[in-house]
């Protein structure tokens, strides 16, 4: 099957260092990202979350079961490791760990230069090639705090593949690789530019189909990756700002600064011979073994007459007692 | 005229929550609520359709963790106790609301629902997997599986041995439960990483589902968008989700479940009534929880709520089912003219959306199925294997990395609150691979320890924990589950390697984390 490719796929020149990270690119230490946590808009996950929902968070700490294991997970496992995972078409999360011995070796080998050097992540663009350490299309460095042990980095190009090195830059500018990552491939953020001869579709027909496919209707004129992002953003912003008022789906109760709820119930209780037949408001009720009974009613505003009638099982005798209860509720304000 | 297909998929999943060490464990309620509100009502509607010989086709994933809980004796007993108490509470409610007729009819409705649930549960001898199997054996329901513990595959790409274990354990588990090998799989969180199809192929799977952009952003361009399946190079078929139909049900802004006449999920007598009164029906530690008795309708945007009106809600569900069908007909007619083949509309939903979150969901589904059967001729319900049998020639592409999570990729499971778990999970995966390689054939205690180690690793991998850490109200529990399974794994691994297995410890964790009795650690390769 022949594929038509456009020039974006053409061979690229051998590795060259590129200028300081472009505007679109960025890197954020994971710790900082944590602080300004991107809150997932309520309405996006509310439904999925509902299946884990047992009610508003309890106000006091629940007793936790005694774990079989009292130990905590270690910080690390004393190994040289650098792992990069795609978070989305642009961003990758990178975590690393270095053996104590690796530190010692570097120190022994580079001495004072090592102490004066700064750590960096070097990202190699290795899209569509087998990386041999030298043939990357391009690479760029991002200074990192090695003790952070993880980092979010914006690689900025959907559909590309990357390999990263964690290393240090010696005072004279040489980069020393300490550990190399796996290959991380970023997904496309829009339709592929590759088409398929056997399954060809004209561009405008594909655009219409794409619009249909993402639920934007058939009259979409531009590649929809962008529109889709806009739709997401719209949902996200309305979610962040006004999710409580804009989302009609059974939302969690609005927290008011102050509030009061009052309701009233009525308990009617009594006792008679255990074998007597008792009815309350004309309906028979069950007695306890000792002849006592308790009834509980939600009490609305108004007057309730509650005739309790007991008929003896042994002699022809009936007793009736009728509590009359009135509830009247006022509010201020 | 017949112009296209509708493939409805319900994804049934809950993480494995089973705590024999506690008499009453809050998170087990996830299962009990889903049984009462989703699984039993769905089984009841399948029964009605089958009894009345209404033609229907549905696809449902029962994840291995969910299926394992549904056949677990301890959890079955606990559910029986749970539903028994709900029946008792409903009886009291009928009495308590005597002077409030609008509420009393609802109390009676709940009493009926709960007693019917209890009867149905007992009628299937407490085994709901057998209930679902019945409809698969009858040819109406296509049951598919999922990753063994719903581990999110794209974040296991650096240790694919774990993806393989998730897939192989699930396939074995399915074959044992349903008496035939599985053909389809719901990827956990719809998370697809290019190349995972090869692992699916090895385990005998014929098809899986991805979110819309998984197909739309495939390479090369898919000629039919999401309206026809594609084949991966491995030969496994991939179906893309239709966003339009998802949005109608799913979207909290435009979706049906937000209708003001539908039942309000967040008002429950467990919170609304006097504490002493509800005490026997909430958590024994004195924590108020949802009981399932909810008296109000959504009503509007303020906190003011009116009592639920079941008749009005039922009418709404019928209207919404008609609207959904009408829109699918229009969609299919348009696509039929535009494409040179009959389109397939794939509409997957979380099963727990139906009944639990959207109380009227099962009712809506039943109206929809009946209307499709009798009120139109454009659409036909289909399962993936039926569609492939009728339409075997499809385009070959590589789908794109994608998920159905927020923003469409991995961010829900990889962000500040949960990114710390991966260094531990990956380390455990590497170690498990090493152990499987180092001990290709062992017996006795060592084999048991290795099998248990794999159970612990799989349980730690459930995507639910990362999801809850990012969004939920049970964060401490999710962290604890991740930590404890990993610690148990590392301890077992250490003991196997050091040749000093503590049998008491092993027995204890075997009895607690008892999922997948027939697991074989060697699948982690």
Image (tube, coloured by chain):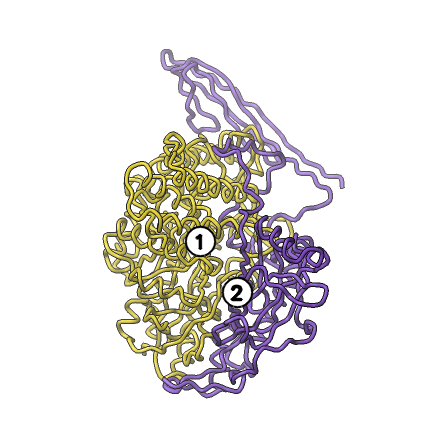
Chain colours: A purple, B yellow
Q: Is residue B374 above or below residue A261?
A: below
SS for callout 2: helix
Q: Which mark is residue B408?
A: 2
Q: Which residue occupies 48% across, 76% down? A: A128
Q: Which residue occupies 39% across, 32% down? A: B502
Residue B489 figure quarter:
top left
- Estimate how packed mark 1 is, as few (under 14), some (14 to 19) or many (20 or more) residues with alpha carbons within 10 Å: many
Q: Position of residue B115 (x, y in %)?
A: 37, 39
Front one among A164 and A2? A164
Spatial distance from mark 2 to mark 1, Cα to Cα? 17 Å
Front one among B182 and A157? A157
Chain containing the residue with disc 2: B
Quarter of the picture holding the N terminus of chain B: bottom left
Q: Which residue occupies 57% across, 38% down? A: B271
Q: Position of residue A313 (x, y in %)?
A: 37, 15
Residue B373 appears left or right of A294:
left
Quarter of the picture holding the C terminus of chain B: bottom left
SS for callout 1: loop
Front one among B150 and A118? A118
Q: Is residue B72 above or below residue B417?
A: above
Q: Is residue A95 above or below residue B208?
A: above
Residue B479 figure quarter:
top right
Front one among B453 and B69? B453
Q: Is residue B83 visible?
A: no
- Residue underneath mark 1: B151
Earlier residue among tags 2 and 1: 1
Q: Is residue B149 above or below residue A158?
A: above
Q: Position of residue B136 (x, y in %)?
A: 27, 56
Q: Residue furthest right?
A: A333
Q: Residue furthest top?
A: A315
């Amino acid at each position: 099957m022949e594929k038509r490719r456009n020039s974006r796929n053409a061979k690229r020149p051998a590795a060259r260092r590129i200028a300081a990270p472009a505007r679109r690119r960025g890197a954020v230490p994971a710790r900082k990202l944590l602080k300004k946590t991107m809150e997932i808009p309520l309405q996006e996950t509310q439904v999925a979350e509902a299946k884990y929902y047992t009610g508003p968070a309890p106000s006091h700490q629940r007793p936790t079961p005694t774990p079989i294991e009292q130990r905590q997970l270690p910080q690390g496992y004393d190994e040289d490791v650098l792992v990069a995972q795609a978070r989305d078409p642009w961003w990758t999360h990178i975590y690393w760990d270095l053996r104590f011995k690796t530190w010692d070796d570097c120190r022994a080998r580079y001495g004072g230069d090592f102490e004066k050097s700064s750590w960096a992540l070097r990202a190699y663009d290795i899209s569509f090639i087998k990386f041999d350490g030298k043939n990357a299309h391009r690479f760029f460095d991002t200074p990192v705090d090695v003790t952070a042990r993880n980092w979010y980095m914006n690689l900025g190009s959907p559909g590309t593949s990357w390999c990263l090195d964690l290393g240090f830059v010696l005072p004279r500018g040489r980069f020393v690789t300490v550990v190399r990552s796996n290959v991380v491939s970023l997904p496309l953020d829009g339709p592929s530019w590759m088409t398929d001869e056997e399954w060809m579709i004209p561009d405008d027909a594909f655009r219409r189909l794409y619009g249909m496919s993402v639920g934007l209707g058939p009259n979409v004129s531009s590649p929809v990756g962008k529109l889709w992002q806009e739709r997401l953003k719209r949902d996200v912003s309305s979610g962040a700002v006004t999710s409580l008022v804009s989302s009609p789906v059974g939302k969690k109760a609005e927290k008011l600064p102050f509030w009061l709820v009052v309701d009233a119930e009525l308990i009617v209780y009594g006792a008679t011979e255990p074998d007597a037949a008792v009815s309350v408001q004309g309906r028979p009720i069950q007695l306890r073994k000792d002849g006592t009974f308790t009834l509980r009613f939600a009490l609305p505003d108004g007057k309730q007459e509650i005739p309790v009638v007991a008929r003896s099982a042994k002699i022809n005798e009936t007793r009736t007692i009728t509590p009359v209860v009135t509830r009247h509720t006022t509010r201020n304000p | 005229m017949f112009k296209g297909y509708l493939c409805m998929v319900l994804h049934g999943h809950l993480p494995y929550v089973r705590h024999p060490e506690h008499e009453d464990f809050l998170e087990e309620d996830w299962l009990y609520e889903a049984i009462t509100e989703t699984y039993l009502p769905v089984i009841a509607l399948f029964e009605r359709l089958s009894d009345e010989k209404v033609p229907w086709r549905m696809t449902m994933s029962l994840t291995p963790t969910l299926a394992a809980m549904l056949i677990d004796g301890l959890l079955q007993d606990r559910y029986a106790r749970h539903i028994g108490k709900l029946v008792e509470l409903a009886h009291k409610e009928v009495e308590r609301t005597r002077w409030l007729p609008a509420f009393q009819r609802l109390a009676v409705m709940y009493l009926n629902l709960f007693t019917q649930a209890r009867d149905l549960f007992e009628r299937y001898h407490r085994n709901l997997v057998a209930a679902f199997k019945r409809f698969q054996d009858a040819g109406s329901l296509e049951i598919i599986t999922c990753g063994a513990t719903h581990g999110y595959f794209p974040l296991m790409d650096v240790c694919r041995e774990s993806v393989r274990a998730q897939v192989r354990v699930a396939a074995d588990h399915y074959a044992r439960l349903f008496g035939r090998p599985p053909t389809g799989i719901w990827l956990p969180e719809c998370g697809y990483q290019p190349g995972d199809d090869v692992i699916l192929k090895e385990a005998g799977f014929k098809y899986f589902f991805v979110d819309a952009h998984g197909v739309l952003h495939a390479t090369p361009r898919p000629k039919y968008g999401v309206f026809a399946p594609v084949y991966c190079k491995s030969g496994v078929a991939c179906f893309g989700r239709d966003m339009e139909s998802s949005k109608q049900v799913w979207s909290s802004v435009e979706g049906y479940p937000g209708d003001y006449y539908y039942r309000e999920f967040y008002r429950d007598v467990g919170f609304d009534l006097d504490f002493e009164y509800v005490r026997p029906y909430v958590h024994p530690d004195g924590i108020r929880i949802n009981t399932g008795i909810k008296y109000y309708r959504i009503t509007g945007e303020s906190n003011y709520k009116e009592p639920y009106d079941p008749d009005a809600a039922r009418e709404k569900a019928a209207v919404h089912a008609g609207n959904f069908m009408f829109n699918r007909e229009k969609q299919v007619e348009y696509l039929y003219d535009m494409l040179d083949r009959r389109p397939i509309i794939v509409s997957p939903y979380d099963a727990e959306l139906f009944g639990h979150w959207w109380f009227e969901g099962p009712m809506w589904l039943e109206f929809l199925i009946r209307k499709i059967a009798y009120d139109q001729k454009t659409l036909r319900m289909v399962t993936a294997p039926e569609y492939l049998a009728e339409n075997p020639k499809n385009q070959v592409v590589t789908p794109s990395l994608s998920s159905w999570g927020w923003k469409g990729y991995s961010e829900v499971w990889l962000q500040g609150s949960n990114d710390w778990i991966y260094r531990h999970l990956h380390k455990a995966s590497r170690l498990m691979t090493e152990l499987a390689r180092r001990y290709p054939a062992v017996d006795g205690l060592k084999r048991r320890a290795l099998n248990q180690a794999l159970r612990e690793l799989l349980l730690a991998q459930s995507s639910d924990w990362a999801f809850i850490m990012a969004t939920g109200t049970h964060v401490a529990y999710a962290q604890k589950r991740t930590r404890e399974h990993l610690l148990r794994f590392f301890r077992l691994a250490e003991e196997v390697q050091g040749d000093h297995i503590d049998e008491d410890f092993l027995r204890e964790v075997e009895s607690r984390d008892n999922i997948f009795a027939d697991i074989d650690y060697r699948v982690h390769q």
